[in-house]
Image (cartoon, helix red, strand yellow):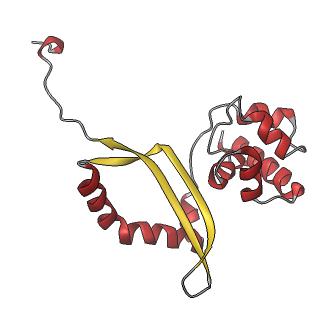
């Protein structure tokens, strides 16, 4: 399965490269976030039927057999060696460094719970800093999910 995913991902990346378009350009044309478009073309997200025509219009070189493959729920996985890439290492480092404070603020603002990584939007933008230099702005927009208190339900008990 992972071997098949690697082949399909390579084909999808080739179509994108041949188009000459960036993820941000494809995002504008499809109405998706740039990160979600990248997830689709890396087989980390499922292409929905209503989005398929938009993606095919944005990437006319995308063959129908790849569209059909993209509509199958993917094996969402990652290569543990990715951490060796400096960008991914720094992203991981930033989350680990700021994570405890972010968690505390989430709990303070929302209560005891977590941010969903399923009902989740992510985008990367290029912005100018106060010093006029280019900066990377990453937005994680996840639904808040409160932890539930667990009660023993008598009617479901096996006594």
Q: Residue at x 47, y 67 (%)?
A: 92
Picture quarter containing residue 100? bottom left
Direction from residue 108 to residue 134 in the image, left or right:
right
- In this view, the residue in front, 5 or 63, is 63
- Asked if residue 38 lies left or right of residue 55, the reply is left
Relative to 120, 103 lies left or right: left
Image location (x, y in percent) of residue 62: 86, 42
Q: Position of residue 47 (x, y in %)?
A: 68, 36
Residue nearest the observer in this picture, 57 or 129? 129
Q: Is residue 45 left or right of residue 10?
A: left
Residue 155, position in %: x, y?
Answer: 15, 11
Where residue 74 sits, quadrant-wise, is top right
Say above or below: 124 vs 127: above
Q: Is residue 153 above or below residue 31?
A: above
- Work out which residue is located at the far bottom of the displayed protein and give it: 131
Where's the N terminus, which quadrant?
A: top right
Return the x and y of residue 111 as percentages of the image width and height: 24, 49
The C terminus is located in which quarter? top left
Q: Residue at x 83, y 46 (%)?
A: 58
* Numbered disc total: 0
In the image, what residue occupies the spot 87% across and 38% down? Answer: 63
87 versus 31 height, above or below: below
């Amino acid at each position: 399965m992972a071997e098949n995913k690697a082949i399909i991902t390579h084909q999808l990346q080739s179509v994108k490269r041949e188009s000459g378009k960036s993820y941000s350009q494809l995002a504008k044309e499809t109405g998706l976030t740039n990160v979600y478009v990248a997830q689709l073309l890396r087989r980390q997200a499922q292409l929905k039927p209503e989005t398929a025509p938009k993606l095919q219009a944005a990437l006319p070189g995308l063959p129908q057999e790849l569209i059909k493959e993209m509509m199958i729920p993917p094996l969402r996985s990652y290569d543990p060696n990715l951490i060796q890439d400096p960008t991914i290492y720094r992203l991981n480092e930033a989350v680990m460094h700021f994570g405890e404070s972010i968690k505390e603020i989430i709990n303070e603002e929302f209560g005891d719970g977590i941010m969903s990584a399923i009902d989740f939007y992510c985008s990367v933008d290029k912005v100018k800093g106060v010093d006029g230099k280019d900066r990377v702005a990453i937005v994680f927009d996840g639904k808040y999910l409160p932890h539930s208190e667990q009660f023993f339900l008598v009617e479901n008990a096996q006594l």
